């Protein structure tokens, strides 16, 4: 699934959460645990910007 579609799905199904897109190997993981944040990981080398790993709350 493309990262933008994943973020749109998360926002529509769980408006109480904030989706944050991170690039695997480039973006550092955000510090601390935040139960209202979902990290969506993508691989910058993928020309379709597909989600590279399962989105994680925290």
Image (tube, rainbow, N blue to C red):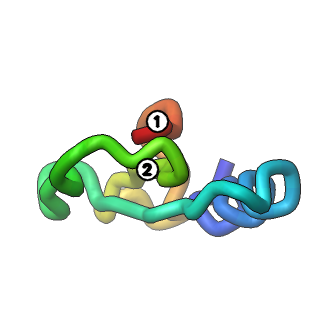
In this view of the protein, which residue sits in the foreground, 34 or 57? 34
Q: Residue drawn 43% across and 63% down?
A: 21
Q: Nearer the viewer, residue 24 or 14?
A: 14
In the image, which disc is placed on residue 56?
A: 1
**Looking at the picture, how far across and down is residue 18, in whole percent?**
57, 63
**Distance of label 1 from label 2 (alpha carbons):** 5 Å
Q: Residues within 10 Å of mark 1 (few under 14, many from 20)?
A: few
In the displayed structure image, the side of residue 30 where residue 56 appears, left or right: right
Q: Residue furthest top?
A: 54
Q: Report which residue position mark 2 lands on.
A: 39
- Residue 48: name its quadrant: bottom right
**Spot occupied by residue 57 in the image (x, y as percentages of width and height):** 48, 38
Image quadrant where one finds the C terminus: top left
From the viewer's perspective, tell me whether residue 27 is left or right of residue 39: left
The residue drawn where x is 44% and y is 34% is: 53
Report the front residue among 49 and 39. 39
């Amino acid at each position: 699934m493309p990262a933008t579609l994943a973020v749109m799905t998360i926002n529509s199904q769980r408006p109480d959460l904030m989706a944050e897109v991170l690039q695997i190997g480039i973006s550092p993981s955000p510090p601390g645990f935040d139960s209202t944040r979902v990290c969506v990981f993508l691989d910058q080398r993928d020309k379709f910007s597909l989600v590279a790993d399962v989105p994680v709350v925290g």
